[in-house]
Amino acid sequence: MLVGRLRQGEAEAFDQIYAVFNKPLFTFLIRLARHRDVAEDLHEETWLRLVKHADRLHADTRLGPWLFTVARNLYVSYRRSRALEDSAAAGLIGLWPFGPRETSPFEKTAANELERRIERALAHLPAASREVLLLVGISGLDQSEVADICGITPAALRQRLHRAREMLAQALDRDAVAPSVLEGVPSCPTR
Amino acid sequence: MSDPVITRLAGLPAAEPDIIRSDHIRRRCHAHLARHTRRSPITSRLTKAERLAPVWQSLIAVLGLGYLTQAIRFALDVYGLT
């Protein structure tokens, strides 16, 4: 219904979709990318992809998984391009504006210690583990949809999720024992 | 979800997108939708498969008709009726 209206170019249909998914999508991207500037660019590109491809959407397309898939793929492309840049200019990395040791405003101002610890632990995980935790824990998608988004089988997702949970729990334990272990790891710069 | 780690994650505050930037994205998307709707009001409603359907349906009809014609000609030849 909503997809059909979007395919016809209805701005109101777009607004309804935007109202539902704008914040969860941005939350996913900012926690995945860990840099507000990057997340904002990827967020904008995701929405533009939706309207550019609106006429090719099937009537039964589930917009949540579609949007998160695009966002995740854009992030993977961004990481690949960054990896190439990093390998080509390893000596200049300190001059790059998205330095890995950057401390976000959120980290400075977050009131809740537990939230801060989770943010730090999450930021400490590899991207593949972080993305499954974010998609399952934050986006509200079910596991089969998350498996589709990540391009893996449900069994592989369960395994990856299990590992990611263990890694996060261990990171949280380490942080509880010695908070300095994860100090300096950038966390989610939410506002 | 009962898993404590996932529950903790779900409890994290949502990130707030910048209001000005969100509005900018919305306006860009509206503009794109309006442009696209003006350019192709009918075809924009159709998926690629739907647009191509008349083409392949016609092709199958032509091939089927050709095959049937040849089959009839062959049968007439066999019975010496041509």
Image (cartoon, grey):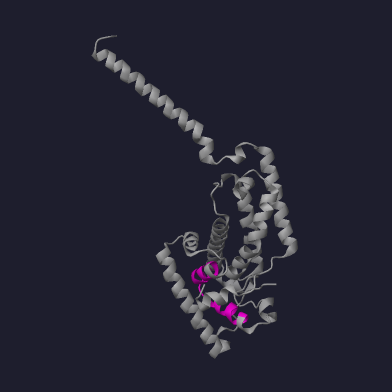
Q: Give the total of numbered labels.
A: 0
Q: Quadrant of the C terminus of chain B?
A: top left
Q: Which residues are magenta?
A: A115-135
Q: Is residue B20 magenta?
A: no
When the figure is inspected, residue B67 is found, relative to residue A159, above or below; the finding is above
Magenta stretch, main secondary structure class: helix
Q: Is residue B50 left or right of residue A23?
A: left
| Residue for point 64% across, 73% down | B13
For residue A185, which quarter of the picture? bottom right
Q: Residue furthest right?
A: B20
- Residue A162: percent from the left, percent from the top? 44, 74
| Residue for point 69% across, 65% down | B17
Work out whether residue A10 or residue A116 is closer to the camera in this orientation and state it.
A10
Q: Residue furthest bottom?
A: A177
Whether residue A123 is visible here, answered yes or no, is no
Q: Is residue A123 magenta?
A: yes
| Residue for point 69% across, 39% down | B38
Whether residue A108 is visible here, answered yes or no, is yes
| Residue for point 70% across, 80% down | A109
- Residue B18: percent from the left, percent from the top? 72, 65
- Residue A71: percent from the left, percent from the top? 57, 60
- Residue A129: percent from the left, percent from the top? 49, 71
When the figure is inspected, residue A27 is found, relative to residue A60, above or below; the finding is below
Q: Is residue A8 left or right of residue B58?
A: right
Q: Residue furthest left?
A: B79
